[in-house]
Amino acid sequence: MRANYKVELASGIFLLLGILAMIWLATRATNYGQEIGKDSYEISARFGNVAELKDRAPVKIGGVMVGMVEAVELDPVTFEAVVTMRIDTRFDEIPNDTSATILTSGVLGDRYVGLEPGGSFEVLEDGDELFITQSAVVLEQLISKYLFNTQAKEEAEE
Amino acid sequence: MTDSAKIAAALRPLGDTGRIGLFLLRMLGSLRPTRSTLVNTLQQTYLVGARSLVIIMICGFFVGMVLALQAINALEQFGASDQVSLLVGKSLFRELGPVLTALLFAGRAGTSVAAEIGLMKATGQLDAMELMAIDPVERIALPRFLAGLLSVPLLTAMFNALAILGAVVFSLGVMGLDSGIFWSKLQTGVYFDQDFMGGIWKSLVFGGLISLVAVYFGYHARPTGAGVGSATTNTVVLSSVLVLIFDFIMTSFFT
């Protein structure tokens, strides 16, 4: 009986340690709780080019994450990229003339959606669409514009 | 060999797989919520899980340290040493934690279970139980299977936790990286449902596989000393192979 009690105690401690380790890992070593969950509403926006914007990319206002990109799809009629986002319900007073831009985290970082609040008194609700949008800046297009510009200037000077 | 003998030899692994599957069904069929099953399972959790803790913790710590070392070595060339926690965290939670824990478990606990049951068979204890109308599958095999299924995810969690600790000790203590950047990259970049939970599901499957194989080979060992020895060898070999195969299958489903 005594040996049995020690064994049960030891296995109980083992189970407790294992569960504590799991909880510690889940809370301290992952992004648990930082994801936008069910308390969120959906909005959408159309862009000409979203570059490398992916699912779960952050949606930020002023650099602070307020939501996540849920899906990036192509409209087969207008060939625009339709981005659906989930915004946390804590941020329920975003004006409905807010503009959306595709920005980059740092110079070579991941793409995210930056929202610039407008001035309307009406707020965004579930299912609304943002109509003022700005596509992503693609580095290659920028370089080719610069080269074209330089070439045009050189030709004008001749 | 004649043609039919060759075909029989080629189909034998299929038969073995079927036998193992049928044994699993037999074990699950004998699952009854009795107090003795619970007590036995708890006891086996100690023998199988708690006793593996030391090796898991030591190996976890050193794996974390070597991961951090290799990661910093590689990332330094791009000036991206700050990403070390992201690299270590993702690779650990997704692959190295579950697989290494499973392989260590197979070597330490899988062999011990297979040997124990094999010896019980060789000394006639399993037959004696049947004569006393005690189902040896329910009394001996099932608790060890359930204990393994329960222990491996917990051991994986401990392995991961100690590996993170090892990575912390190495990157912050030895290499002097910034602790704020380390933890914030870890906490924003490592995803809970893809990386962490994916690893937990994997470890659950691995635990089931290893325990099933160990219990099967022990139960069906040839009742001799050499038979017990080959049961333990086959346990380690088959469970390692199955773990790595299922690792690929599960990863391709999740990613």
Image (cartoon, coloured by chain):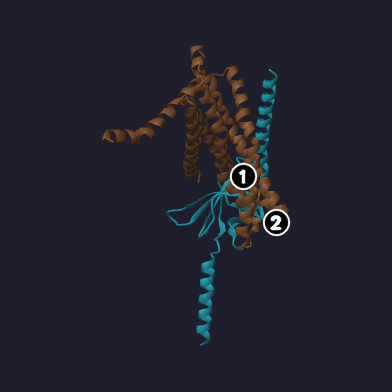
Chain colours: A cyan, B brown
Residue that badge 1 annotates: A36
| Residue A98 visible in this rendered orientation of the protein | no
What quarter of the picture does the N terminus of chain B occupy?
top left
Q: Nearer the viewer, residue B145 or A111?
A: B145
Q: Is residue A69 left or right of residue B252?
A: right
Q: Chain of mark 1?
A: A
Kindly check if marks 2 and 1 are in contact, taking CB atoms under 8 A apart as contact: no
| Residue A147 visible in this rendered orientation of the protein | yes
Amino acid bearing label 2: Met
Q: Is residue A58 left or right of residue B228?
A: right
Q: Chain of mark 2?
A: B
For this orientation, the residue located farthest to the left is: B3
**Residue B51 rendering spot, x and y as whole percentages:** 64, 32
For this orientation, the residue located farthest to the top is: B132
Disc 1, SS: loop
Question: Which quadrant would residue B177 be assigned to in this image?
Answer: bottom right
State the residue at coordinates (73%, 52%): B173
> In the displayed structure, would residue A106 be above or below residue B207?
below
**Residue A142 rendering spot, x and y as whole percentages:** 54, 69
Disc 2, SS: loop
Marker disc for residue B175: 2
Q: Residues within 10 Å of mark 1 (few under 14, many from 20)?
A: many
Label 2 to label 1: alpha-carbon separation: 35 Å
Q: Nearer the viewer, mark 2 or mark 1?
A: 2
Amino acid bearing label 1: Ile
Q: Nearer the viewer, residue B133 or B92?
A: B133
State the residue at coordinates (55%, 45%): B95
**Residue B182 rendering spot, x and y as whole percentages:** 68, 52
